[in-house]
Amino acid sequence: MNTHPIIETRQLTKTYGGTPRVDQVNLKVQQGEIFGFLGPNGAGKTTTLKMLLGLVQPTQGTVKLFGQELRSHRLEILNRTGSLIESPSYYGHLTGLENLKVMQRLRSLPAKNIDKVLQIVRLDNHRHKPAGQYSLGMKQRLGLAMALLAFPSLLILDEPTNGLDPAGIGEIRELIKSLPAQYDMTIVVSSHLLSEIEQTATSVGIISDGKLLFQGAMAQLQAQNRAAVHFRIDDPARAVRILSEHGYRPIMQEQQLVFSAMPDSEVARVNEILVSGQIAVSRIVESRKSLEDIFLDLTGKERSL
Ligand SMILES: Nc1ncnc2c1ncn2[C@@H]1O[C@H](COP(=O)(O)OP(=O)(O)OP(=O)(O)O)[C@@H](O)[C@H]1O
């Protein structure tokens, strides 16, 4: 059985003008995953994806796709890879169909693939219209059709929903979700929006300032979502004193004591200490960080994303 990762980078680095923009990144993407590559603008996503495709030469480090070195097996690898990086490129004066034909002939692909991809991206009714007259969403879908034309094993999409309206975003999202099972594809999709990755990806990599800060299953990221427990009480200063005698170090926030993460048994114990110290506990509330908060904590960026 073939168990090597579909993508594996080692210490992948790209330096521009002395500054590492992609900094010793070790990526691992397994067969059949939808890997969400997440990071704020300028984090190094596009540069990383371009290195995976041999479009940018790494300053340091290696790229292996399908278990083979990109440097020595470039053509073989790229024949099995489809991509949409930055804006799609097409001939504006040619129709959608003609654009796909150009590519199909250039790459000696079966002609029947054209109909298939037109259906997949739902452009079959617009195939005879010049691509230059397509809406933004249609242009994006044409770009996707081109990336899919060879039915690649690996599909790399850089911010595929950028600039689309909510309906267009939803369509692309559903399309991405359907591909791995239907066509046995592995997908890498980048975004600066967690909300978008959250709904499609099975695993995630989070990059900020060129560094990979987290990599793992979506569920693992969600597991970092640990609950804090808030006690609303009538005399916080005295409560802190009493609790510290029992070895607890809560944070005082106005009328509340906050414990960063706490099992249920401890909650009961703290409550008992407070009540026997004649402190009235009016409320015990659990608060979880949203995934957005976790993302912002990891990247150290403000909420302006
Ligand atoms: N050819 C280049 N020459 C110099 N600097 C570059 C070049 N390409 C990218 N950079 C810089 O590298 C950093 C990372 O850029 P990159 O495009 O990879 O980020 P990104 O995460 O894809 O962000 P965005 O979503 O905004 O495209 C940026 O600071 C960018 O200015």
Image: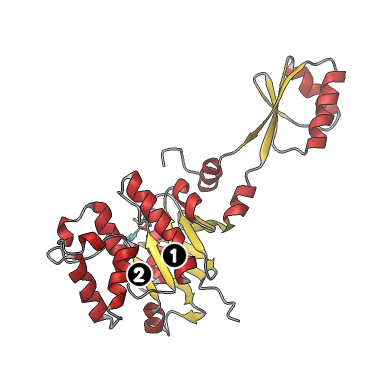
Q: Point out the quarter of the image occupied by ligand 1.
A: bottom left
First along the sequence among labels 2 and 1? 2
Front residue of 167 and 300 = 167
Residue 295 drawn at (x, y percent): 52, 46
Task: Kindly identify the amino acid type of the residue bearing the numbered disc 1.
Answer: Leu
Rounded to the nearest whole Å, what is the CA distance between mark 2 and mark 1?
10 Å
* Residue sitting at the far right: 276
Q: Judge the density around disc 2: few (<14), some (14-19), many (≥20) Cα neighbours within 10 Å.
A: many
Q: Secondary structure at mark 1?
A: helix
Task: Kindly identify the amino acid type of the residue bearing the numbered disc 2.
Answer: Leu
Residue 129 falls in which quadrant of the image?
Answer: bottom left
* Residue sitting at the far left: 93
Q: Are marks 2 and 1 in contact (CB under 8 Å)?
A: yes
**Disc 1 residue lies near ligand 1 with CB under 8 A:** no
Q: Is residue 186 in view from this perspective?
A: no
Front residue of 155 and 276 = 155
In the image, is residue 175 above or below residue 65? above
Which residue is at a point 21% across and 52% down the rendered structure image? Answer: 135
Which residue is at a point 42% across and 84% down the rendered structure image? Answer: 73
List the residue tagged with mark 1: 179
**Left or right: where 47 falls relative to 91:** right
Q: Secondary structure at mark 2?
A: helix
Which residue is at a point 84% across and 19% down the rendered structure image? Answer: 275
Q: Is residue 227 in view from this perspective?
A: yes
List the residue tagged with mark 2: 148
How many numbered callouts?
2
Which residue is at a point 83% across and 33% down the rendered structure image? Answer: 247
Instruction: State the quadrant of the N terminus.
Output: bottom right
